[in-house]
Amino acid sequence: MKFSSAIPRRKFLKIAAMSGTCLALGYVSVFGEEPKIVNLDLENGNAESELNPFIYIDTDGKITLLNHRPEMGQGTFEAIPMIIAEELDVDIANINIMPSPADRGKYGDQMVVGSQSIRRNYELMRRVGASAKEMLIIAAAGKWNIAAEKCYAENAMVINRSTGAKLSYGDLVADARKLKAPDNPTLKQAKDFKIIGKSLPRRDIPAKLNGDAQFGIDIEVPGMLYASIERSPVLLGKLISFDDTKAKAVTGVKYVLKTQREVFGQVRVGLAVIADNYWAALQGRKMLEVKWDNGDLETWTTQKIKDDYIDASRKPAEVFEQKGDFDKTFNDAPVKIEASYETPYQTHAPMEPMNAIVSVKKDTCEFWGSTQNPNGMKDFLSKKYKVPQDSVKINYTLMGGAFGRRSLTDVVEEAADLSKQTGTPVKVIWTREDDLTQGPFRACSLNVCRGAINKDGNLVSLEHKVICQDIRNQSGNNSKPTDGIAGGINTEYAIPNLRINGVLRKFYIPVSYWRSVYHSTNCFAHESFIDELAYAAKKDPIDFRLSLLKNHKRYTGVLQKVAEKSNWYSPRETDTGKGVAIVERSGAFVAMVAEVKRLQGKIVPTKIIAAIDCGTPVNPDIIRAQTEGCIVMGLTSTYKSGLTIDKGKVVEQNFNTYKMLRIEESPAIEVHVIESSEQPEGAGEPGLPTVAPALTNAIFELTKKRIRALPFKLEEL
């Protein structure tokens, strides 16, 4: 399979036209109805329906897939073709893949968030492949003048069961494309899979290694200018005045212009230095003399926010879920446990800093860059500049990391505004310092937990209260949090008296989606507290969890797997501790055991063992890679980095203070993918939430010290 990180649709259509006859299929999605497979008009689309991804077969038998999901490292460029190739009965090497245009009408939702790409497209992509195969079989049967049932497909050929005669897919395209796509094609049984379930190598990796792959920051367009934007270090600071004399004296600087971006209802102002090269723009920016009015925002510190959260924890909370009578059973129980857990703001810190190129003209808009949200980009530009959707072109590339940050349109807003003002395409590039300090961030949180054990050693009541900012309610006067802030609190535990609630806080600091979102904070608190309850009940932490999950096969399966692979029930080696944690995220179930050792007087994480059940594993190696990435990111946020606020601004400016886990610091990582025939679920996020609680629970087993605030310092244990 060939890999292309950015091939325009126009070029694809030219290739199709040169190839002659072709078969192109996609699926129609009408709200409230089952999607249907349809024949596609490559040049004009289908004016009557909303279309999603489609495949193309030329007369040489080559197959091309227009993938509608941007690639940010999650592996959809390999996994989606695998699904189609399985049902189409072709060698995966015969499939080419190219990014589709950004078009919600044809391709549906194209945003890549929440580990959704495979779980939302698995059945549909199978049906696309199966429909094409059935049409090719019917075409072959027509040539042989026999019933379609007397033919079968294998390795891009249709074979006559009686005579053994063969026709290639390329030979059949001309006839097959005239047929109506079947509504309900027959899908393979899992036992017959030849591709799905195999750890095939990702075809995008070589291009990333040799430099052929293009990311947003690599793109250049004719006539474009570069912009670097100075903003208040105190978020929401107001621009009072500036002197740009020295900035404009820098060779190459063309303009100094005001601009702004909106983040969840909050407008943030900046001063852009625009030049004919990025270095000049950056040097000009350094020469600006700017005065900001930050008001009382400069009084805010991490400690002030913490004090606010503690005060808020005593206020009435919004109840998200409740069963039984928590108050009575808690008050009556002989053993009561209460604990609070703190997590900081975190930045996304992708290796590719935020960037965007936009060209705004009278009747058209065009974007080039890396984005998780092609449709959102198109919607914003169309609405903002009153340009029809079909006159807005989105050229999305590979992403050099995203983690939720690239789902927003704020950087595009800056580039578009500057393009409108200058009349030229403008490329905005954020510095690393911009990327780390300007937000939006993962929300910091305070989790207050209470639980009770009865005289028989059973957990009878639990309350988990979340105090934090709400991504979906950051501005305005509404004081009620949404239940999204409770993500990661395990409601599958068989606890007879349960209350989950939350208190909303609103600040000038913007928050947004960060890999696994609220699961990354709440799971730390919840699984740490479950561990504390296990010790209070004098029970083994895994056995305690299993006793609360007797009727949950998938949780039980991953717990038993990590118990086995970690030798959990064997006597501990000297100076060794182990901890466990579980979570469900994006439909996938994860159990994790962390191991720590005391080496030369220091506590060192030595091994992480994870088991993940995400349903049918389309490509187990991709799942393992995603889980490994989650673990590394989780370790970083657990004991390497976190954002602190002082005088209203973010203290950590670059990787010298916002530290990343280095490869030589990583513990051994072992990921076990559970065999399953269930519907595929997400894999890009589920491996992260359990890292912090598994590790801190392991540290407790070894040291008897409970860690309830992140990040902590290993050297201080």
Image (tube, grey):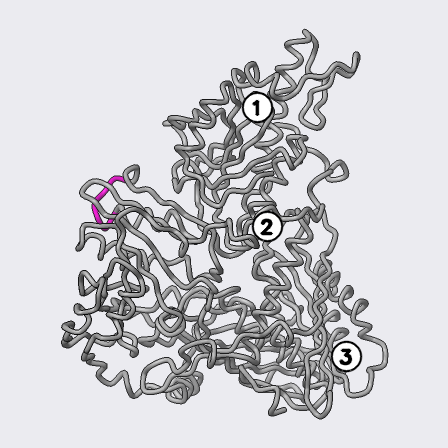
Give the vertical position of 599 relative to 345 (above or below).
Answer: below
> Dot 3 lies on which element?
loop
C-alpha gap between disc 3 and disc 1? 55 Å
| Among the 4 quarters of the image, the one containing residue 295 | bottom left
| Among the 4 quarters of the image, the one containing residue 654 | bottom left
Question: Residue 259: x, y in percent?
Answer: 21, 63
Q: What residue type is labelled 1?
A: Pro
Q: Name the residue under label 3.
A: 540
N-terminal label among 2 and 3? 2
N-terminal label among 3 and 1? 1
Q: Identify the disc placed on residue 182.
A: 1
Outermost residue, front direction? 251
The boundaries of the magenta stretch are 383-388
Q: Does the magenta stretch include residue 387?
A: yes
Give the vertical position of 537 relative to 35 (above or below).
Answer: below
> Dot 1 lies on which element?
loop
Question: Residue 234: x, y in percent?
Answer: 29, 79
Q: Name the residue under label 2.
A: 206
C-alpha gap between disc 2 and disc 3? 46 Å
Q: Which amino acid does label 2 sit on?
A: Pro
Please report the residue visible at 47 percent of the width from the left and 36 percent of the height from the top. Answer: 52
On-image quarter of the C terminus:
bottom right
> Is residue 551 or residue 703 the one in the foreground?
703
Labels 3 and 1 touching (C-beta < 8 A): no
